Amino acid sequence: MKIAEAGHEVDLISVVPVKRSHSVCAQGGINGAVNTKGEGDSPFKHFDDTVYGGDFLANQPPVKRMADMAPQIIYLFDRMGVPFSRTREGLLDFRRFGGTLHHRTAFAGASTGQQLLYALDEQVRKWEVTGKVNKFEGWEMLSLVLDDHQVCRGLIAMNLQSLELKAFQADAVIMATGGPGLIFGKSTNSMTCTGSAVSACYQQGARYGNGEFIQVHPTSIPGEDKLRLMSESARGEGGRIWVPRNVADTRAPKDIPEAERWYFLEEKYPAYGNLVTRDIATREIFQVCLDGQGVGGQNQVYLDLTQIPADVLTERLGAILEIYEMFVGDDPRYVPMRIFPGVHYSMGGLWVDFEQRTNIPGLFAAGECDYSIHGANRLGANSLVSCVYGGFTAAPSAIEHAQNVKRGDTETSAIFDDELKRQQEINDQIIRNEGTENQYKLHEEMGKVMTDNVTVVRYNDRLKATDEKLLELIDRFHHISINDSNLWATQAVPHARQLWNMLQLARVITLGALNRNESRGAHFKPEFPERNDEEWLKSTIAEYSFEAPVFSYEPVDISLIEPRKRDYSKGRTKAAKMPQEGNELKPTSLEDLLVREGKKVKN
Amino acid sequence: MSEARGHHEKKRLDNPPKTVKIKIQRREREGAEAHFETFEIPYRRNLNVISALMEIRKNPMTVEGKQTTPPVWDMSCLEQVCGICTMVIDGGVRQSCSALIDDLLLNSGADTITLEPMSKFPNIRDLKVDRSRMFEHLKQVHAWIELDGTYDLGPGPHMSNEVAHERYAYSRCMTCGCCLEACPQYHEHNYIGPQAIAQARLFNMHPVGKMEMEDRLNGLMGEDGITNCGNAQNCIQVCPMSIPLTRAIYETNRDVTVNGLLGWLKK
């Protein structure tokens, strides 16, 4: 949209019609410190909450820029006609979300992601009509095309009906391909969230940052085919997490008196209560169930909304309560929901500098598929704002690159033909293979071993065993045979390619976790239960090699807020002080920030 | 019991079967002959149609023991917000992710569930269809707000929560096509159908969107326009998002009449 607005042309490549992308699943809202509730909220506090919630692993300058830009982003969506909920005065309404004490989250019912995505889809459709945007929906990205200077000159994509491969030439490529939840088999992600495209970039030399940081959402609805998200907004609106104090208590939840309920989050974290950050809530719920305290001794706890009037719930949370009722059958307005943590979001992703540039010139990344902003843990309602921020930053960077880059001298048609041929050979090989392995079963095995060992609680011996298992699966992958003799619109070939890419990325996640001997944000090791800033206040960088990912580490830019211990059991007494006049931390002008980041980028 | 007022326990199968049969319409590619194949899978209480299809895909063998190709269908969010997995299930159009096997068997009293692709769109293969024309319809009705630019121009117009709510109801349309599948008037290119009309209404209701109302109404005044609605009201019955489609058609029709009259007077 930004690029089209600047007068340039864009090919938009998407596996599904863009209106059906995974962002539709984002429920709760979008953060921005607009401060309409007289709470003294400010972008600086949003910045501080995000950095603090991310356990200080994020480079701070881009986080600050995002928090500063957030109110503008929300206003822009407001102008696009997103039906945000309103106050009596007709202004935007804001709700509370996890990891903050302020009402900072703008929302459109309980399907905010859907509404924001639709607004962007509508605007892009307008550019489509003017001819600035060409959509290629139903195409999957397979690889980058790099010239002899390793500059990205375009990409190869596959038509998902005909399996036709096509080379797309480009001055710049922006990845906005979301997360890799399907590596864990069942997650809250859509079935398109394989991380395949990003993994392809990684295997061609793009650096992958902080892969081991995977957010497990505290409240999801276990299902046969996926884990459905129960938004944090359910707790934002007053939902309470509890289990019966007595595990053997078989009474219906409403018949259990208050005194015999254990509201374990409220007890342990009186200030934030049910709205502690996601990593903490997840770990507490997981531990309660591990200790056999789950409802009925099973892996489930109550998320209780029944104390809130049914009509209020319908208005503010209708969409998500419908999902629960639709898939489980109980009406959450009258019966507490049964929930359990589920893999939700990857804080890690393609390494980018402060202008969303990857290490491959001409390749940019924005959104969940890049590693910036969220550090070791993402706050609720920060994903929508971060992906829009990422796009708004990547677009001018891409334009700038396109206008100034020095490209390799290679005869360009040759590099496209070569890459096209290489990709066609991979497809042909997959189609020719006649082994005994079943690709969907391999996927299930990968999902299980990753969910068992690389999610909430991580042990080094199990992480090692997981990598061995992944190597075994990679080996067995060579013996799959697609069980589809009809290649028209077959899903077996694309799935096989995704599976290979997922296996590669799974190793990055697992080995990154194995190496990091500390606990920080979503990464928790009982053998190393504390955050260790001396040794591990650094970003993990993985680079592909045939044998195994090669890891290096990069210092975190903590130039704006000094790291402090995260402690949600008390109020925010230790929060960074709003900088005083003349203080170096004063909210900087964009120019100041760019200078500082310019320095950083050149390092 | 008073706190559970308004809540009815969900009905479940009393004697769930050991297995369930899934009868699927197969088509190799657009234009090829269609035929049915039946598969049998173990019953589990929380199965939905998608998990049944996933189970079949792993090892596609019919009840007759014939090895066949895996059925092809579209799926993405599995939470009934993306609209992609829409198909005709036991004769009714709906999303397959939210179609629970238990409910389907309970409703039909049968031991077989029948899956067919939507019939009003090109059938690419098996259960997969091409609904791109619905997105074209959105272009035809100018379904967006015209912005001066995406730079910072402050907040949008004040709006009452009531208007926001009314617009939200329309804005939840996921372009799934259920309304078109169920509409007796809609066949390929003869009628733009309820979804596009409702989207025109969504933007005509917005204080800024209103300024392009004429463009939107013009998109609805052609041969395939709003007057093709036969008032069968099937659309509102099948809409999974409970969008007030008939109301959108009624209100937009009124706008079209007024607009047409004004245009005539101007001449």
Image (spheres, rainbow, N blue to C red):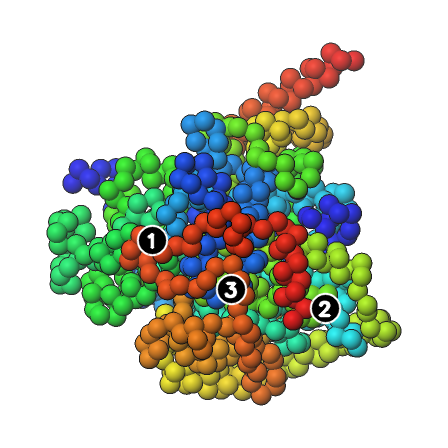
Residue A71 lies, with reference to residue A300, above or below; the image says: above
Q: Quadrant of residue A524?
A: bottom left
Residue A328 vs residue A205: left or right? left
Q: Return the residue at label 2.
A: A361
Front tag of 2 and 3: 3
* Residue drawn at 57 percent across, 33 percent down: B156
Residue A267 lies, with reference to residue A422, above or below; the image says: above
* Residue drawn at 73 percent across, 78 percent down: A422
**Residue A278 at what x, y percent from top left?**
38, 59
Q: How many marks do you count on the picture?
A: 3
Q: Are marks 3 and 1 on the same chain?
A: yes
Amino acid carrying label 2: it is Pro
Please name whichever residue, B182 or B54, is drawn nearer the observer in this view of the structure. Answer: B54
Q: Return the residue at label 1.
A: A573
> Distance between the Cα atoms at labels 2 and 3?
26 Å
Q: SS for tag 3?
A: loop
Chain of residue at mark 2: A
* Residue drawn at 63 percent across, 61 percent down: A597
Front tag of 2 and 1: 1
Q: SS for tag 1?
A: loop
- The crowd level at tag 2 (other Cα within 10 Å; few <14, some 14-19, many 20+) is many
Q: Return the residue at label 3.
A: A558
Amino acid carrying label 1: it is Thr
> Distance between the Cα atoms at labels 3 and 1?
20 Å
Q: Quadrant of residue A432?
A: bottom right
